[in-house]
Image (spheres, rainbow, N blue to C red):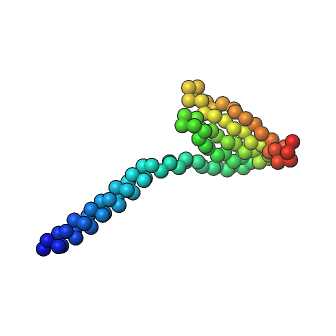
């Protein structure tokens, strides 16, 4: 009877150690940023995070072959234009 108790305690102790290790490692992992792409007609929009307090919106204009970047202004509750890039010039090296 004593041997079966010892084996059961050992199995439970090993299981608890494994579960505790998995729990600690899951809290140490970096969170995955949630980004999504939406395409409609001549535009593709992708969200991204620059810092913990700054979110970005990338808008690709397929017809004009350009990229516009906007940052969300939480105080003004609006999008601020950050940068506009002509992709043809960028890829040609101009």
9 lies left or right of 24: left
Residue 45 is at least partly visible in this image: yes
Please tell me which residue is depicted at 85% across the width and 45% down the height of the picture: 93
Residue 64 is at least partly visible in this image: no
Please tell me which residue is depicted at 82% across the width and 48% down the height of the picture: 91
Q: Quadrant of the C terminus?
A: top right
Residue 39: percent from the left, percent from the top?
67, 50
46 lies left or right of 29: right
Viewer-side residue, 7 vs 47? 7
Q: Quadrant of residue 85?
A: top right
42 lies left or right of 33: right
Viewer-side residue, 42 vs 48? 48
Residue 6 position (above or below residue 38): below
Please tell me which residue is depicted at 27% across the width and 67% down the height of the picture: 11
Q: In this figure, what is the number of numbered marks?
A: 0
Residue 12 position (above or below residue 82): below
86 lies left or right of 82: right
Viewer-side residue, 70 vs 40? 70
Q: Quadrant of residue 51?
A: top right
Viewer-side residue, 44 vs 16? 16
Please tell me which residue is depicted at 26% across the width and 64% down the height of the picture: 12
Residue 43: percent from the left, percent from the top?
71, 46
Residue 5: percent from the left, percent from the top?
17, 69
Q: Which residue extends farthest top?
A: 76
Residue 1 position (above or below residue 74): below
Q: Quadrant of the N terminus?
A: bottom left
Residue 6: percent from the left, percent from the top?
19, 68
Q: Which residue extends farthest left?
A: 1
């Amino acid at each position: 009877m004593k041997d079966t108790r010892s084996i059961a305690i050992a199995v439970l102790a090993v299981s608890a150690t494994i579960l505790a290790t998995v729990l600690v490692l899951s809290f140490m992992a970096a969170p995955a940023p949630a980004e999504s792409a939406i395409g409609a007609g001549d535009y593709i929009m992708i969200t991204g995070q620059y810092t913990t307090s700054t979110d970005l919106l990338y808008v690709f204009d397929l017809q004009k072959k350009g990229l516009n970047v906007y940052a969300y202004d939480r105080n003004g509750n609006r999008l601020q234009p950050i940068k506009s890039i002509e992709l043809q010039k960028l890829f040609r090296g101009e």
